[in-house]
Image (cartoon, grey):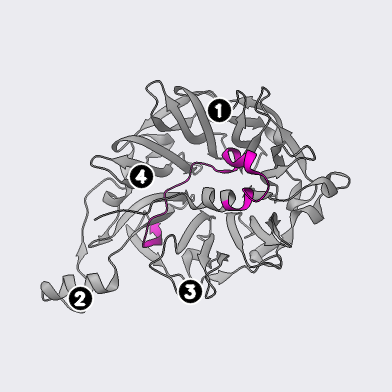
Amino acid sequence: MIINNCFNFRSFIFFTVIISGFGHITHVSAQKAPPILTGQRAFLVDLNSRTVTHLDSFGPYPSIVGAIIPEDINRAGEVVGSYFNSSGNRRAFITSPDGANMRDLGTLGGNYALAYGINGTSQVVGWAWKEGSGYAFITGPNGMDMTDLRTLAKDPFGSAVGIFSSAYGINSAGQVVGVFPTPENKFHAFITGPNGEGMRDLGTLGGADDRSAAYAINDAGQVVGRSGMDEYTIHAFITDPGGMGMRYLGSLGGGRSEGRDINDAGQVVGWSNTENGEDHAFITGPDGVGMRDLGTLGGRSSYADSINDAGQVVGYSDIVGGGSHAFITGLDGMGMMDLNFVVDLPEGWTLTSAMGINNHGQVIAAGLIPEPETYALMLAGLGLIGFVAWRQKSGSRD
């Protein structure tokens, strides 16, 4: 299967927006994220039953680049992300439990919205276009009533929050983390109080590069993300509970690292340079102590994107021969496995990246399936029109 037109959609969106006036901050907003592939689909994987469900987009463009992108999943199996609507605009969505019944979340008045995080009461956070700029948003429970986070900030800080902010993570109390432009036009990580109220600058790790971004928060209020120190170099950070303080998580021997997610034990996952310059997924112990290399699926690079409270990690890795596959680990980050060999997939389907995992063993992933016309021809040649052959894959099961 040929994989082409690979690019990072989240990076693309921010680059497109930022070059209109803030080109100097693109490398802070553009984070490492799974590659987006031509013909990509979104899936809900159930590790207990080994089943894979295709999350149908209700947009009319299933074959274009990144037609639907899942971003997060909560304990009920509700999924959030973005899709193309009938006008060709990116819009945020939420599903019902177990990935059913996809629903558009609306916008702040513009044409675009992206959902990045969801908590147990189905409050959703993300980014939406409004009056010529992009702003962080939060919804109420059940994904209702999208609100610009600036309206919940306390003056004078709220009035100083500029354009191009985005919210990436939310905990059970509704504390939100993300990135915003300071009055000095430096992009910094932020944290809010419960239900998105108030907004506080988390600062940086110090040094010449005065920029940071926060991607995830646990129920204790520990925040993880990335911060500049040396110019054009990013470093993973963790805060103490309540978003207090910021400390460097270290690296796997190289000069760059990034924290992507954190569980309630304070275990952090993300990626880091190694001594030989490769990017590898990592996991830490509780409270971000001790960084361990998770390895790869045989290729040069891997990236961890999510962790549950049992320490199971998901992400994506290069494979031998090129391309990427989704991976999952066992408990406490032990034993990286190709997700394609842990579940039962229809013939021709490939899971290329995994973005989230909940405590019930449900994983959201992206991947490729044969185009309808290609698949029909393939089945016709086998005399199997109207019948989809299911392939039993061997592998470990958590």
SS at mark 1? Answer: loop
SS at mark 4? Answer: strand
Left or right: 35 with respect to 243? left
> Could you give the CA–CA distance between mark 3 and mark 2, rounded to whole angstroms?
24 Å
Which residue was labeled with disc 1?
233
Q: Residues within 10 Å of mark 1 (few under 14, many from 20)?
A: some
> Measured along the vertical axis of the image, is residue 367 above or below residue 103?
above
Foreground label between 1 and 4: 1
**Residue 166 versus residue 220: which sits nearer the camera?**
166
Decide whether residue 25 is among the magenta residues: yes
Q: Which residues are magenta?
A: 16-45
Q: Earlier in the sequence, mark 1 or mark 2?
A: 1
> Could you give the CA–CA distance between mark 4 and mark 2, rounded to whole angstroms?
29 Å
Which residue was labeled with disc 2?
387
Which residue was labeled with disc 4?
327
**Residue 225 versus residue 10: which sits nearer the camera?**
10
